[in-house]
Image (tube, helix red, strand yellow):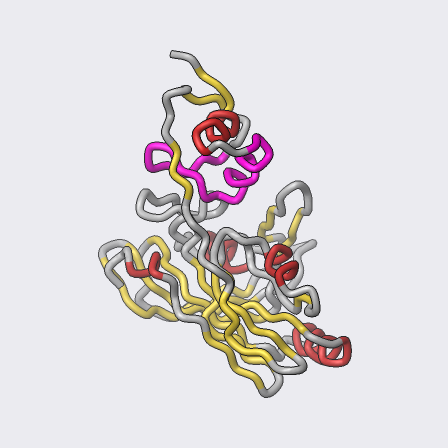
Amino acid sequence: MAKDKAYKLLAIQEGISNGKAKELIDKGIVTCEGKKLLVARGEISDKSVFKIKEIPQVKVIFQDNDILAVDKPAYLNASEVEEMFPHAKLLNRLDKETSGVMLLAKNEEFRGKAIKEFMDNKVYKEYVAIVDGKVIDEFKVDLPILTIKGKTAKSKIDLVKGKPALTIVTPYMVEGHKSKVQIVIENGRTHQIRVHLQYAGHPIIGDIQYGKPSSQVQRVMLHSKITKILDYEFEAKEPREFFHFGF
């Protein structure tokens, strides 16, 4: 059986450039035989058939002269969203596969105020996640996190070098051996929720890096639902993937 690099075969199938094909695989939106392609340069059968997931549009939740709140779909980097709004600057970031509320400032004066709110841990950040295992009672993980930057960021709990991080988990529903939970965080370290839930024995479904891969979804089942900052409150409804598990 002949083989070739995945991105080259995808380029042929879709009639696109090799660079565009690699970009689609890197975004995490290409599947083959129901499984997400993880390595663009990996060699697979030249008979492979690919499917490309359509990324929903970024939705504007609210905007005025100071702030822009958007509902970011999964598979988009925060920087890609920022590029869509050239007159605004990011106030917070979400991981590529995390969806939900993301904020941008529309002027430097407000940006300064908002950044101070984040630094002082005065911003309310509520998420919803689908996790492995039965979460019956509320629990907290108050452990420092160290992030190692590289081609991709990797975080871990480190009691010596880590920075403070608090995650509060409250159960919504239990279905079989999975749970839907509410998560409220302070600090907001890179991959904080994902690392803390892994530590607690309830990794997030669909999280290949820290969690529990799933054949039902091709993304991390984590959604930024509510954010409150200064006198503003924004909410983004859970996307349809969250209803695949009976919740």
For residue 134, side relative to residue 222 (left or right) = left
For residue 53, side relative to residue 167 (left or right) = left
Which image quarter: residue 102? bottom right
Q: Start and end of the magenta stretch? A: 17-38
Residue 212, image x, y percentages: 39, 46
Residue under the point 68% across and 77% down: 114
- Residue 201: tell me if it is visible: no
Residue under the point 40% across and 61% down: 129
Q: Is residue 89 above or below residue 65?
A: above
Judge by depth and name the residue closer to the eye, 129 or 198. 129
Residue 247, image x, y percentages: 27, 63
> In the rendered image, which quarter contains the N terminus?
top left
Residue under the point 37% across and 56% down: 131
Tally of marks? 0
Judge by depth and name the residue closer to the eye, 53 or 74. 53
Residue 2, image x, y percentages: 42, 13
Residue 107, image x, y percentages: 73, 76
Point out the residue furthest to the top here: 1
Residue under the point 47% across and 27% down: 12
